[in-house]
Structure formats: C-alpha cells, structure tokens
Image: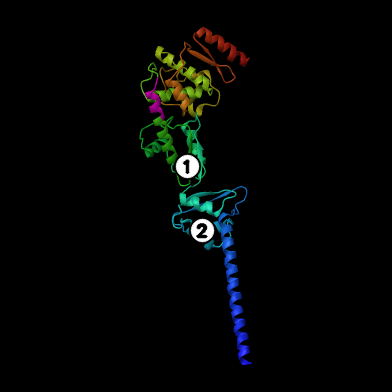
Amino acid sequence: MTRRRGDRGSLLTRLSVALVLLGACAAGVWLWADWSRFADAPLAIGAQGRTVEVARGMTLKDIVQALRAQEVSAAPAWYWRALAARMGVAGHLHAGEYALDPGLTPRTLLERMAAGRVLQHRLTIVEGWTFRQLRDELRRADKLEHATADLGDDEVMRRLGFPGEAPEGRFLPETYAYVKGDSDLDVLRRAHEAMQKYLAVQWAQRDPAVPLETPYQALVLASIVEKETGRGEERAEIAGVFERRLKLGMRLQTDPAVIYGLGSEYDGNLRKRDLEADTPYNTYTRAGLPPTPIALPGKAAIAAVLHPAPGDALYFVARGDGTHQFSATLEEHNRAVARYQLGRKR
C-alpha cells in the first residue's frame, strides 16, 4: 500500500511539472505572438500625428520612455530591445527629430532612426522680398535656431563670411529644407550660395549685347524687374526697356527703386515730392543703376535681364489689370498714361 501511495504521488508530481511546462510553453507562444504583432502594429499616434526628439546620448531605453511619456507605446521595454536586436539596429539609432505619422509601426520607426531620416521643415523665400522681410520670416520659422536675432545686417554678412557685402538681393528665392538644430545662418548660407551659383551660370550664358558690366549689376537690375511685374511673360520685355534706356543714357525712372530709397518714410502713396527727393535710389534724379538691389530677384527675373526681349519700347505703364502697355515714343507713352492711369483715377 505504501508503494502505491508513492506511485500516485510521483504521478501527481509529474503531472504538475508537465502542467507547469505546458503553461510556460503556452505563455511563451503567447508572448512570441504578442511580440510579433507588436513589431508591425500601428502605434497609438492619433490622426494629427506628432513628433519625438532623440537627443544625443539617448539610449533605446530613453527613447522608449519618451514614447511612453507621450502615450504612444505601452509595450514593455524588452519588446523594443528584442525588435532592435533582431533588426540589427541596436546601438545604431541617430539623434534628431522624427515624425510620428498615423499608422507608424515600431519596426518602421526603428528603421527611420537607424537611417537618420529625421523630420524636415521647410522655409520659402519669396521673390521680391526685401532682406528685412526675409529676416522676419526666419524669426517666425518653427524649430529653427535663431542665431541672428540680435545681430545687425552687417554682422550677419560677416558671420556668413562676406564682410562688407550689402545683403539685399544676395539670397536666392527658393524653398529650403532644414532640420531641428539648424540655425537661420545655415539657411542664409545655403540661399547665398545658391544665388552665387545661379547668377554665375546665367552670367556666363548672357546675351553679349547686354549693357551690364558685372554680375552684380545684373542682380541690381533683376531686382527692379522683379518689383515692376509679377507677370512672367513681361519680365524679358521690361528688362529690354531698362537696358535700352541704359544704352541711351536715359534715367530708369522706376518707382520701386524710389520707394525702396524712402524706406520707412513711404506710407503707401508715392507723391511728386517723393519723385523729386534725391536719394541714391531715386532713378528719376540719378542716372544709371541704384547702388544695390532693391529686393530678392528670382531666377526668372535674372534670366530676363541677361536675355532681354528685343524691341524698341522705352516706356511702359500699368494697365490696371496686372499687365503693362509698352511704348516706343514719349508721345505714345503719354497717351497710354492718359488712358490707363489718368482715366482710371477720374
């Protein structure tokens, strides 16, 4: 009878062990299945999306804690460690700001971090802006370090490596991408380099009849063309008018240059006394080009100045619909002014 009780005890022990092992196996299978689902299941990001910043020196554990703090992931840290190990990216995650898009999975997020595909922001420099307007836009730019906020224009140019260079017109209007940690000086440096390269290429290919002696003179005239019209089809024609005037020794008589010279004194209404007030930018009182550009010219305006349209027009006047009436003689021009300007005022 004793031996039989021992047999039953041994059997119960073996059954208990078996049940424990079976339970452990079941738990292991469940954990494996849950981990497998975790790798490719969307994170709890929401419809609007968000970002996460990985600072230099952060470990994977730190990153997981940052995700948990945003309630993006509630998964155990070892899930992330196991996934990173299986992907071969553990210890190879780059610092930076990363986009958390709706539908993003842990696997895709780790792939982004391993490749350093950080979130890019964009800033657009608009044709016709002044350097002051560009600096205002840089101050408003999100996630951009403002290294020039307390600097004057001269100091900004010195920091860029161009001491003594007037900043107006020197930055190419384009859309520039930047990442968190970049500064406004980084964006300005790229825009300045882009302008130099584009201007050099266009200057080398210029029409040999263009009456301009330097690329900088082309930049000055292009800024005037930029401010005179927003119509692409008119730029080359307006450039032709100004260049014929330069060849004949006529004054340019362009209102945008006068307005630029008035600075803060301009109140939106250009008066006769303004046209008669002599400043370095008053092209009614002074011959030739202004001393600097008056705005940021775009690629089209620069190309128009270096490849002007042929013709005999020496004057133009706004029609009031965004286009201009071109005239070869002063008599024709006066009739156009009477029709499109004086008539509209009456």
Of residues 300 and 277, the one drawn nearer to the viewer in this rendering: 300
Q: Secondary structure at mark 2?
A: helix
Q: Is residue 319 left or right of residue 95?
A: right
The stretch in magenta equals: 198-206
Q: Is residue 344 visible?
A: yes
In this view, the residue farthest toward the top is 331
Q: Secondary structure at mark 1?
A: strand
Q: Is residue 317 left or right of residue 202?
A: right
Question: Which secondary structure dominates the residues rendered in magenta?
Answer: helix
Of residues 230 and 168, the one drawn nearer to the viewer in this rendering: 230
Position in image of residue 56 (x %, y %): 44, 54
Q: Is residue 284 visible?
A: no
Position in image of residue 49 (x %, y %): 59, 48
Give the residue at mark 2. Answer: 83
In the rendered image of this protein, does residue 248 appear above or below residue 269? above
- For the C terminus, which image quadrant? top right
Give the residue at mark 1. Answer: 178
The residue located at (52%, 40%) in the rendering is 140
Magenta segment includes 202: yes
Q: Quadrant of residue 189?
A: top left
